[in-house]
Amino acid sequence: MIQNATRSCAFRSSLMFLSTLMCFATPSLADGLIRSKQPDRGTYTPPVLVDAKVETVETATSGRQVASPGDSGLVDVPLDSPDDPPVYSDSGPGLSTLPAPIVLANEPPNRPTVRTVGYQQDDQEQSRQTRIQHGPSPQVVQQCSCESCRAGVVNGGMIPAQLHTPLHITNEPVFDLGCDAAPCCDGSGCDAPGCSGCQRWGLGSDDWFGSIELLLMFRSGDHLPALATDGPLDSTGTNNPTIFAGNETVFKDMTAGGRLTLGAWLDCYKDRHLVARGWFAGEQSYGFNGDQNTHPTLVRPFFNVTDGVTPADDILVVATPNEATGSLDIHGDSNVYGADISIRQLWYKQYGATVDLLYGYQYMGLDENLRISDRATSLTDVPPIGSVRATTDLFDVENDFHGGQFGVASHYREGCWSFSSLAKIGFGSVRRRAILSGSTFNSIDGNNATDPNGLLVRSTNAGTFNDNTFGWVPELDLTLGWQQYPCFDVTFGYHLVAMTDALQVSGAIDPTLSVNSSVPPIGAQRPTANFRHGTFTVQGIHFGLSYVY
């Protein structure tokens, strides 16, 4: 045990020495970065004399009485004269050959009292240990190897710097009880409530850690159907209109977001800690705006399934020469965010690396919306010149995940460099909500009328829809850190998170853009509210500053 502990201490000391040379860090910082319990001192075993291995050594005599081999104890050696002190010189036998003592000049007046530590056996011949005595007394040199004393805190007070020296010896028998023992924390133990020495409830600066990061994220996007063209669509391929909006993947460009992480150690050895995080990927927008000046011919395509009419591609005119003037506006937003809180328990540590198991609660949200508005003024007699038609379609979807999480977090430090990883998965309920609404405003010869039907949202699919399903939220994070400042790491990394069975805007639009253009609708009741779901992902890189102790 002692040999392994010695090797471990030697290896750890080497790493701390290299870190100090590379980072110019202070010893207290190095101590805080190492999450490990101090090695046990082992059990003291007194030497045992074996007769077969005792060797007799010739010694010179000085004419004084010495102990004989058969004596059970030592015999005092008298001086030449009880009243004469020993004479020190550079020559002569016996005491007369002792060198002159060294006198220390300018000795500090309040020099700590030197005490020695011995040992004793109990009645059961148990192992002997060395106890650590605490106290801020400036007259007694003391030191403890537990984390609270290594941080300079003893019984709620600071040890003076000049007193933080190696342990001196006292004749009093003492015993080492470790950091969890009663003497280390005002008699209550490191893990006990209200322990001021280890500050489990009144957390000190070395019990906190955290980071703030800039996220540059990319969403998996959402593929929208064609929403604005210069002519009707043709599935046969003979007619290829120019598509101004839609028929593309939107919400896929880079956005800037942020992440905040706060944590607290829950024990003296930094083996268990609480971590809370909150993040958002930034708002992603999509838009199109056109009129007769930028697009002389501007229409909204759809698939007409009105009874009595052969199903075919059709258009709703917004602007076209000599027929109508108008404008079309399309706007959409996407927001992604999340938060979690977890307990992380140390599972493995070796050679500067630690692996934690984590469990806790996780939340993730995904919101998207799309609004399509057009306004057209007639230039012909049918409808009458000056007649105005304005149509609006609105799609608003929300996804909220609530569930548990479990995973693995690791950390490795080598000198000024550090590497952290996080792999976890959340499981729970995905609550999905869709709000669809449409309207058409008509003004003909001064008569105004509003119809609760748009082009893509009509009475057949308008309304508010809610459902719940079981879903998963996996997450992966890799971070590389460089200790640029004392107690602070500059970090760079990669982040990926996903949500299964998510509803996006495209999943709320009838995939064939089928509508019944008659008002009120007759025949086939299209579009429908049959929503489609899929897996949504967001990933990117992050830069940040991390406070570590």
Image: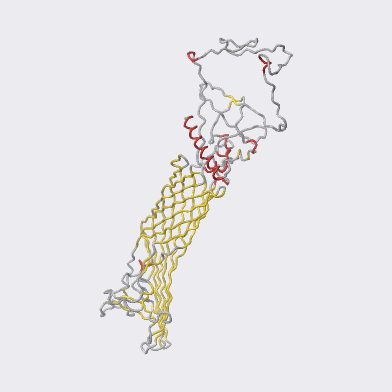
**Residue 324 picture quarter:** bottom left
Residue drawn at the location 43% of the way across and 71% of the way down:
287
Residue 43 appears at what percent x and percent y? Answer: 51, 27
Count of numbered circles in the view: 0
Q: Nearer the viewer, residue 510 or 356?
A: 356
Q: Nearer the viewer, residue 449 or 546?
A: 546
**Residue 243 picture quarter:** bottom left
Q: Nearer the viewer, residue 475 or 508?
A: 475
Q: Compared with residue 399, is residue 462 higher up or lower down, i.e. above or below?
A: below
Q: How is the image coloured?
A: secondary structure
In the rendered image, the residue lying farthest to the front is 91
Would residue 135 appear left or right of 122 to someone viewing this image?
Answer: right
**Residue 217 picture quarter:** bottom left
Would residue 520 appear left or right of 388 to someone viewing this image?
Answer: left
Q: Compared with residue 321, is residue 283 higher up or lower down, i.e. above or below?
A: above
Residue 25 appears at what percent x and percent y? Answer: 57, 44
Residue 249 appears at what percent x and percent y? Answer: 37, 67
Residue 72 appears at what percent x and percent y? Answer: 57, 12
In the rendered image, the residue lying farthest to the right is 83
Q: Which quadrant is home to the C terminus?
A: top right
Residue drawn at the location 33% of the way across and 64% of the way down:
532
Q: Compared with residue 45, is residue 321 higher up or lower down, i.e. above or below?
A: below
